[in-house]
Image: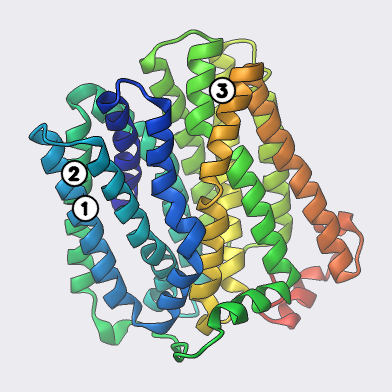
């Protein structure tokens, strides 16, 4: 719920900027850039903090700070004292806190469940994170249309209370702490070198970057298709977001059922998402478009959850925070680049083209990664899509660092 509230605030914040500036696209671009700029600049440092200090204590601080920022914006909006520069400042501050909170929250799940349940717990946590990214904007649209932007900020602020209570009620003795990385020079370079030496890691991160940047822009494309192609209203846009979220929920639950992720599943779902996104741009009617959003959301969430679990399970515990900092960099850091490009393509060539481009880039990136992975392992690319009998036992024998 708290993750959903955070994405609700981001959407409500954008809507508030448009209200305050009478529809200024430039102002909206500035607000979006300030939200995600810290991810581009500081993600590795956030991961280093997650590796160096007790994660439960970090989460106390970050969750309280994010709740306070939401509360400030709620008060300012409710009293009509809010100005654009205040929204900019609070958006940037929220991005700074998220730089530390995201990798810490992603890696803390391993301390809660221990080695035996880690694979399933990571998948569930990733499913929650990715589903919130899709469901949050859909819920925000309903809340804003019903009671205004201030309500979204109040709801988000309240959601952090439950998170803090949950952290407080945890029994530290029942946690499974991992070894902390000692304070030393060169830890960021060490993390980059660690990833570069493992093809499964850096190629997974590269694939996540292309799909998240160019394909995972349904907040923009759903609105463009609903209004620009099918000429529907805000209610239909909300319906499209909800349908997409339903498919995403199914994908999250399917991914969480698997005991371990696999490169085969990663590549199949990444390619399927790209193809489905292209097909969604070809739909002749709004209802056909809605029908295709269900499997598209399912494929996207299965891909995202598998990628997250692959990276975490393929990383040494003492290095996991820094590697997840890299993951959050490629997963969220491309948003300031991808969303404007999708909007520009839609404006120049039509909304359907924005879906064609996003889907084609996603499918092509998946194919390239499959070939590179095959070359790195000295096997043919098709073996990732049709593994031979015995592959599973050989991967298990290599250990968690090589098994994906």
The reply to whether callout 1 and callout 2 are in contact (CB within 8 Å) is yes
Residue 1: % across, % down:
29, 49
Q: Earlier in the sequence, mark 3 or mark 2?
A: 2
Q: Is residue 172 visible?
A: yes
Residue, x 75% and y 47% (percent of image)? 365
Q: Please, what secondary structure does the residue beneath circle 1 have?
A: helix
Residue, x 38% and y 67% (percent of image)? 100
Q: How is the image coloured?
A: rainbow
Residue, x 26% and y 36% (percent of image)? 84
Disc 2: CA contacts within 10 A as few (<14), some (14-19) or many (>=20): many
Q: Which residue is mark 3?
A: 291
User: Residue 22: which quarter of the image?
Assistant: top left
Q: CA distance from mark 1 to mark 2?
A: 6 Å
Q: CA distance from mark 1 to mark 3?
A: 38 Å
Residue 207: % across, % down:
68, 53
Q: Earlier in the sequence, mark 1 or mark 3?
A: 1
Check residue 69 in the rendering and tell me which mark sits there, or answer none.
1
Please determine whether, in this image, residue 37 is positioned above or below residue 117. above
Q: Is residue 257 visible?
A: no
Q: Nearer the viewer, residue 18 or 48?
A: 18
Q: Please, what secondary structure does the residue beneath circle 2 have?
A: helix
Please determine whether, in this image, residue 95 is positioned above or below residue 324. above
Q: Which residue is mark 2?
A: 73
């Amino acid at each position: 719920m708290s993750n959903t509230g955070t994405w609700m605030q981001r959407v409500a914040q954008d809507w508030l900027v448009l209200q305050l500036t009478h529809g200024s696209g430039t102002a909206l671009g500035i607000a979006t850039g300030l939200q995600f700029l810290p991810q581009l600049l500081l993600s590795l440092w956030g991961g280093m903090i997650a590796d160096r200090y007790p994660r439960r204590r970090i989460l106390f601080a970050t969750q309280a700070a994010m709740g306070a920022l939401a509360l400030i914006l709620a008060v300012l909006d409710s009293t009509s004292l809010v100005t654009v520069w205040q929204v900019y400042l609070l958006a940037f501050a929220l991005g700074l806190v998220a730089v530390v909170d995201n990798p810490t929250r992603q890696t803390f799940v391993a301390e809660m469940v221990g080695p035996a349940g880690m694979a399933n717990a990571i998948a569930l946590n990733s499913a929650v994170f990715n589903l919130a990214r899709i469901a949050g904007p859909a819920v925000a649209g309903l809340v804003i249309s019903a009671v205004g932007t201030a309500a979204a900020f109040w709801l988000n602020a309240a959601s952090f209370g439950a998170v803090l209570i949950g952290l407080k009620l945890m029994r530290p003795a029942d946690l499974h702490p991992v070894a902390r990385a000692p304070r030393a020079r060169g830890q960021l370079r060490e993390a980059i070198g660690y990833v570069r030496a493992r093809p499964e890691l850096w190629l997974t991160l590269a694939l996540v970057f292309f799909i998240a940047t160019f394909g995972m822009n349904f907040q923009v494309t759903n609105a463009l298709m609903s209004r620009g192609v099918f000429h529907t209203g805000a209610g239909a846009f909300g319906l499209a977001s909800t349908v997409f979220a339903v498919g995403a929920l199914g994908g999250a639950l399917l991914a969480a059922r698997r005991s371990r992720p696999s490169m085969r599943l990663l590549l199949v779902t990444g390619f399927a998402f790209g193809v489905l996104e292209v097909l969604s741009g070809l739909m002749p009617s709004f209802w056909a478009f809605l029908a295709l959003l269900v499997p598209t959301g399912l494929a996207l969430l299965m891909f995202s959850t598998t990628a997250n679990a692959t990276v975490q399970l393929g990383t040494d515990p003492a290095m996991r925070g820094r590697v997840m900092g890299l993951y959050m960099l490629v997963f969220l850091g491309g948003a300031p680049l991808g969303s404007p490009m999708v909007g520009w393509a839609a404006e120049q060539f039509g909304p359907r083209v924005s879906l064609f481009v996003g889907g084609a880039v996603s499918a092509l990136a998946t194919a390239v990664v499959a070939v590179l992975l095959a070359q790195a392992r000295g096997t043919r690319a098709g073996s990732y899509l049709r593994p031979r009998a015995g592959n599973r036992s050989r991967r298990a024998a290599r250990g968690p660092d090589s098994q994906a």
